[in-house]
Amino acid sequence: MPKALIADDHALIRRGLREMLEGCAPDMAVLEVETLPQVVDCLTRDPDIGLALLDLVIPGARGLEGLELLRRHFPAVAVVVVSADETPALIRRALAAGAAGYLPKSTRPEVMAGALRLVLAGGVYVPPSMIDREEEPEPGLPTLDPATLGLTERQADILMLLGEGLSNRGIGARLGLAEQTVKNQVSQTLRRLGVASRIEAAVLARRYRKV
């Protein structure tokens, strides 16, 4: 049975996140911890944990150190940051460090639930405020050239949609492809890019301007 881990030192926050997760994935077992050492202990002992909701400010963690530690030692676990800090620079740094999503604690419950469903489906959640800021590409970003990265045109399209945080189903809907076809293309894209996860691919995609 898949499991999720909530890491927050406030019981009220943990309870709210638990109820939300149980609503999104009724069959998922949910564990709770209060400190970063407890997070590491749980993930070390229980390989069935596939999702961690991490507050950046818990005992044993400082800034993004906790996120970076989990991404380094438990790369198979999708880590979603749940934080009261909505600083755009911090959100960008968290996503660049491999977070599967960033949820400000001020996020409306229905939006937070949708974000968790996206992550559970394999997507990456980016707060709408960040997407609005990134509608206009930064002038210094190079245009994506599929040949340079060893990708086909279709794989380049998929890479850019991974950068938007879409799940396989979302990518399929956008490109008019079957979900299984997208799954196969994502696997080939990751292999050609030499990255281990779709999160790493999403970070790479954000270094390029859309064609």
Image: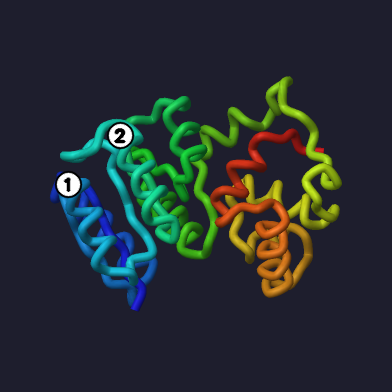
Q: Amino acid at mark 2?
A: Ala
Image quadrant occupied by the C terminus = top right
Q: Residue at x 61, y 52 (%)?
A: 195
Q: Residues within 10 Å of mark 2 (few under 14, many from 20)?
A: some
Q: CA distance from mark 1 to mark 2?
A: 17 Å
- Indicate the quadrant where residue 66 lies: top left
Q: Nearer the viewer, residue 165 or 26?
A: 165
Vertical comparison of 15 with 172: above or below? above
Vertical comparison of 206 with 117: above or below? above
Image quadrant occupied by the N terminus = bottom left
Q: Position of residue 96 (x, y in %)?
A: 51, 37
Q: Amino acid at mark 1?
A: Thr
Q: Residue at x 17, y 47 (%)?
A: 35
Q: Residues within 10 Å of mark 1 (few under 14, many from 20)?
A: some
Q: Residue at x 29, y 38 (%)?
A: 56
The residue tagged 2 is 84
Q: Position of residue 31 (x, y in %)?
A: 22, 64
The residue tagged 1 is 35
**Front position among marks 1 and 2:** 1
The total number of labels drawn is 2
- Indicate the quadrant where residue 171 lies: bottom right
Q: Nearer the viewer, residue 179 or 141?
A: 141
Residue ranking furthest to the top: 139
Vertical comparison of 113 with 66: above or below? below
Q: Which mark is residue 186?
A: none
Numbered disc 2: secondary structure: loop
Dot placed on the residue nearer the N-terminal end, 1 or 2: 1
Left or right of 41? Residue 143 is right
What colour scheme was applied to this rendering of the protein? Answer: rainbow
Left or right of 174? Residue 146 is right
Q: Residue at x 53, y 61 (%)?
A: 122
